[in-house]
Amino acid sequence: MLIWPNHPAFTTPLNSLKGVGPKTLARLNEEGFHTTGDLLALSPKFYQDRRHPKAINQLIPDEEALIEGRILSARAKFSPRTKRRYQEAVVEDMEGGRLAVTWFNLPSYYLKSLSKGRLVRLFGRVKHSGRGWEMVHPDMELGPLPIDDGELAASDAPDSYEPEIRPVYAPIGDLSSGVVKKLVDQALGLLDGCDEIFPPEWLAHNKLNDPIAALSTLHSPPGRVKGLLPRPSQTRAFQHLVFFELFFWRLMMLRTRAKVPSVPRSGSENGPEAADKFWRTLPFEASPEQRRVTLELMDDLRAERPMSRLLQGEVGGGKTAVAGAVLFFALGCGGQAALMAPTEVLARQHYDFLKKSGDALGFETALLTGSLGEKEKKSIRAGLSDGTIDLVVGSQALLSPATVFKNLSLAVIDEQHRFGVRQRLTLRRKNGRVDLLAMSATPIPRSLALMLYGDLDSSSLHGLLPGRTPAETEIFEAGDFPSAYARFLELVRQGGQGFLVTPRIGDELKEPADNEEPLRSLDDIYQDIKRLAGPDLPVGCLHGRMDAAEREAAMEEFRSGRRRILVATSIIEVGVDVPAARVIMIEGAERFGLAQLHQLRGRVGRGGTDGHCLLLPTRSTAASTARLQALVSESDGQALAELDLELRGPGEQLGLKQSGWPIMNYAALPRDLPALAKAHHLAEDVWHAVQTGSETWGAFFDKLDFEAFTERLMVAAEQAT
């Protein structure tokens, strides 16, 4: 998505275009198209080469070709088999080659135009049969009126023909490719006269074409270009649009960050003491890494500009305790603090952990989630509003306009990749100065971190806490249920508890391909493991379609040890901390990304005992086997995340519905990593020039509506959730 000037080419409503009536407009709106700018943002699917007419005798079967010739005969016919009328013509070119042409549903006025001797230009796919060369329903361009009988000469061809490279677009809903092209052509006509956006000197220095020129070329490439025809995504015009899409995203991030006001923090002299008291309430010693990062964050909290920081670390690296230290730092300074988690299960777990310390230190702690009754939510919100509640842990209920704080000082967002820029801004707006700490245990490739979290600084916890070791990982043959289940139950019976994970609940399962075992439903797995485990190993069940009370009850039964085995979906992927969990088995392991498997693997071995991760694929290909093998040989989450990005792309690496991921029309990672680095560097240079009062770049910013651009990006991101 790019930011465009306020020009009719980008702002004209679609119902102003010819051929867009109420029904067509409704279809376009349903697919997310509202203005001509939305149409221009489309990229052609491919180009048709209409530059060079080809002799009929030199055609190749099944190729698309441009033919110029003269009509020898034309007539309407009727097919008894199909009960349909059709039109048939025979065309001869200058070298005497003949082509049979068939049209279905050709308007009657066209038939009258197909008079003998008339010149015609055809484009379509050709085939060869016993009748000779044929072309069915080609595009047609009529030449001059019929000429006298005689040989067709080169001079008879129309002089006005210009070589053409024609873009072909994917259909939009039930609107055909041809209809889409007609609409894009109308939008493209409005682009004439639109001034370029960037200073010409800057473009020349950086060897770039202005995005207005690049957009025009992408939709209407010059027909005189020589050589083989590239795909649209391989053209220079497309690559320039990739660059500017990444450039504008970075500018938006820089602008968003700069809008956070600088407000001095008061009472920070008491914060370190409160953080130290928090550490003393814990049953373990803070590691040197935890101490180092906590001091780094406290320096941020003392600064005049509010903290905006991302804390990354391995599963089991101790991020939650660091978050607790900075939360109590904020409380010690006299403000309120909030921690937001993506699920109620995780929110309750954080609440249980922090409440013990809060009670010991004299701070009132509350839990606010959507499943609470209205009376409870009203009581908690009243406590936040009047300041009697110091620390609140919750889900997205914290974002509600009804949740008002007396003096919110610090907001911590756990599993940040489940949220986006809008959620960060929403929490920030709860008070004049709100420090923000975002945490993620999902390893994020550096390139994605630049895209997703460009408005945040970054800190990292390196390694695992003392006493924790990476889980041992085993891979079973695809569909080898007996061996995998036997190993799983053997490990559980040796002591501890086990997770059994499946990627789907079950009612949405599709028929398996020929080379894969069926992916069983969660209920089938639950019944099987109950039968195999017997009465001495009680089994529980957990998935996202249970209501909040059922999920919490199932989690509590497992956490307390009353259930030795928990059959679950990937709802347990993040934050679930059960120290006695020793083994996790993942059915359909090839359906998960490496980063997600690494997260699931991190659920075991957290209580000082060895952890085991058993991977049971339901299908086996060379690619999936190599990917799972990487998990066996690699325990570093960052390395796995980089590999996952390379193999599966950002959508799979972070999940298909990520509100934080920018909506891109042109750019794609990891393909465009080189462009990303250059775009970020130049965007930062431009932002610095704006900040230092450059008239040139100030005029550039005035020309573009960054407020509307930011809002469009956030709305698009939310719609993807």
Image (cartoon, rainbow, N blue to C red):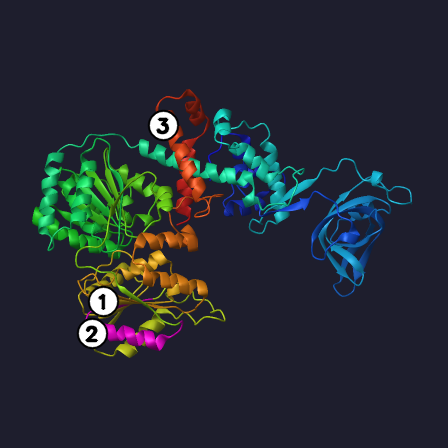
Q: Residues within 10 Å of mark 3 (few under 14, many from 20)?
A: some
Q: Amino acid at mark 3?
A: His
Pick the front one: 640 or 617: 640
Name the residue: 31% across, 72% down.
526
Instruction: Kindly indicate the quadrant of the structure image that contains residue 427.
Output: top left
Residue 86 badge: none
60 horizontally vs 13: left or right: right
Q: Measure how far apart labels 3 and 2 are at the Cα level.
A: 61 Å
- Residue 75: in magenta span: no
The CA distance from mark 1 to mark 2 is 10 Å
Q: CA distance from mark 3 to mark 1?
A: 52 Å
Q: Which residue is mark 3?
A: 688
Toward which corner of the image does residue 284 lie, by quadrant? bottom left
Q: Nearer the viewer, residue 562 or 304?
A: 304
Q: Which residue is under mark 2?
A: 494
Amino acid carrying mark 1 in the image: Arg
- The front one of 321 and 88 is 321
In the displayed image of the protein, which residue is found farthest to the right? 149
Residues drawn in magenta? 478-501
Please report contact status of discs 1 and 2: CB closer than 8 Å, yes or no: yes
* Disc ID at residue 582: 1
Asked if one can make out residue 389 in the rendered structure from this viewpoint, the answer is: no
Q: Earlier in the sequence, mark 3 or mark 1?
A: 1
Residue 38 percent across, percent down from the top left: 52, 40
Q: Amino acid at mark 2?
A: Gln
In-image side of 322 versus 701 (left or right): left
SS for callout 1: strand
Disc 2 packing (10 Å; few <14; some 14–19; many ≥20): few
Q: Earlier in the sequence, mark 1 or mark 2?
A: 2
